[in-house]
Image: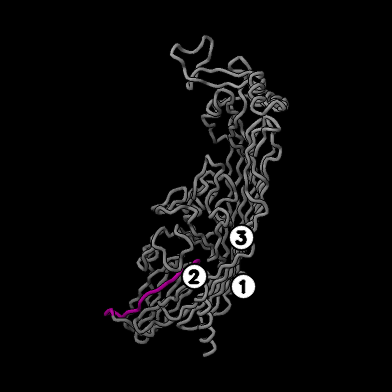
Amino acid sequence: MRLVKALALLLSTLGLAVSLWGQTGTSTIRGTVTDPQGRVVAGATVTLTNVATNAVRTTKSTDSGSFVFDLITPADYRLQVEAKGFRKQIVDNVKALIGKPTETNVQLGVGAQTEVVEVQASAQDAIINTQDATLGNNFESIQITQLPLEARNLIDLLTLQPGSTREGYVTGARADQSNVTLDGVDINNAQTSNAAVPLTTNTLVIGQLPTDRNNITDGPVLRLNAEAIEEFRVTTANGNANQGRSSGSQVNLVTKSGTNSWHGAGFELYRSRGFTANDWFNNHAGVARPPLQSHTYGGGIGGPIVKDKVFFFYSYEGRHDSSGTPQTEIVPLNNVFGDGTLGDGVIHYTYPVPSGGCPAGAAVQPGGCVASLNLTQNQQAYSAAKGTASTGINPAALSALADAIKKYPANDPTQGDGLNTGGYRFNALTPIKLNSHVLKLDFNLTSKQQAFVRANVLYDHQTLPRWLPDTPSPLVWNHPRGLAAGHTWTIGNNWVNSFRYGYTRQAFSQTGDRLLPTHRSIWARAPMCQTLSKLTWTAIVFPAPGVILCPSRKYRTLQQRSLAAIRSTQRILLSPRMARS
């Protein structure tokens, strides 16, 4: 016994020595045992049984009549209380929800221990939080699977909380300040902090969720299968000391586990272009509806390997889309003014309308009268600026501009300057192939020890919109992996140890548009590949019921390397000597 206490003390000391957020991915059931007159009953034997796996935890009520079951798996439980001189009482349907303690008080009746009183716990006991000041809601499996979700994207449910927005802002905090854990293991995106990456400086939106799902590398590292999540809780305000890392929402998720009963589910969602409408801008430009064939399918299955001892749960979710995305790019205008185009070396401009009005035959635009400089005038201006040794405007650039006018006729007047450039609208093919696998094994090692192992493997491909119909499409490859393992040991009536190990690997690459035309302003992303890995372990020891040691955490970054930094260059190519980056 001394050896056990010494080991527990050592583990608790190690837990205090580092910085760790504990208890994530677990739950708590606590209460008080009283007699018919409301006086506390000390020394009562309290047994908690997981209904699905028959895992058992036992403790005794303290001198104040209280009992606590900390660090338990979120599930449905049966609570049994026995004491000398009182009838045995069984409370069914006790729900332990993730990240939220449940209070279940028991009042014993006088009688023989052979007599049994069985009651049902109220569902409100689990829903209403009376134990701490945290604000937030729990979503259970039935809500996750039955609420309508676009492409079964669980992220959309995380924002269905009071004080939250669809962009992920929570009580004033930005989405990139959120903290997401799965089974108590950090799955935060190390590159984007779970928020969106702006496409350009003109669309800079700091700290919000990717509402348009632009890139599969946005959001948490591990994509969350709807069928694989047992429940989750979003703490929007007043987080406890065992939560933290950032000032935003605290999102705790837990994976489903196998049980003594076989259970499973499957689904397939199909969507085609026949159920969509073209947008107004496409109709106005005479562009057809974008192609759309979306298949989202998957399921899960779980059951016993060894009854009451070993259980498994496996889930797969895939999404294969053959779809298109409307794109608008700036292209040279056709000969709308009748005196030439950029391909002819003609540049149009506007000047304020004089008091006598614009010259006869001159076009008028909101900016004023329209005038132009022909190729000769532009050559003279260019030579004067660059010196007599200048070769003038590059003929290859003029040829490329003229070729673009023929290949990409402007059809969107809402883009460009309306003088030299306009918008070219078309549908870019953007197929997506997503594959996500989740496997979890649970073990009832002994009556006092439980363990689990969970693995996630994702293999995703995405095609981003191309710049023009005949240019290469940027490709995104995403292949993250996650591993979590946990062990809970009820050392004694006053000692419980929980150990968590987590490994999360974020790996992706994105290729850019490598064929850069010479007749446009180019925002080109260089090919980029990045691998980020996290290794976390946690150890928590509770010395007495209801008394929680200051939580701690150890976080170690194994790799954080950027093989090629994200960078953008802008080039305006009119002449080799004018090219700049």
Q: Which residue is mark 2?
A: 22
Which one is in front in this view, the residue at disc 2 or the one at disc 3? Answer: 2
Which residue is painted at 65% across and 37% down in the image?
A: 580
Mark number displayed over residue 306: 1
Distance from label 2 to label 3 (Cα)? 23 Å
Q: Which residue is mark 3?
A: 438
What amino acid is found at the position of numbered circle 3 in the picture?
Val
Which quadrant of the view contains residue 530? bottom right
The residue segment tinted magenta is 23-38
Q: Earlier in the sequence, mark 1 or mark 3?
A: 1
- Which residue occupies the foreground of this view, 396 or 192? 396
Secondary structure under the numbered disc 1 in the rendered image: strand
Distance from label 2 to label 1 (Cα)? 30 Å
Q: Is residue 495 above or below residue 452?
A: below
What amino acid is found at the position of numbered circle 2 in the picture?
Gly
Return the x and y of residue 315 as percentages of the image width and height.
60, 58
Q: Tell me, yes or no, if residue 24 can be seen here.
A: yes
Distance from label 1 to label 3 (Cα)? 20 Å
Return the x and y of residue 411 as percentages of the image width and height.
58, 25
As for residue 29 lying within the magenta part, the answer is yes
Secondary structure under the numbered disc 2 in the rendered image: loop
Mark number displayed over residue 26: none
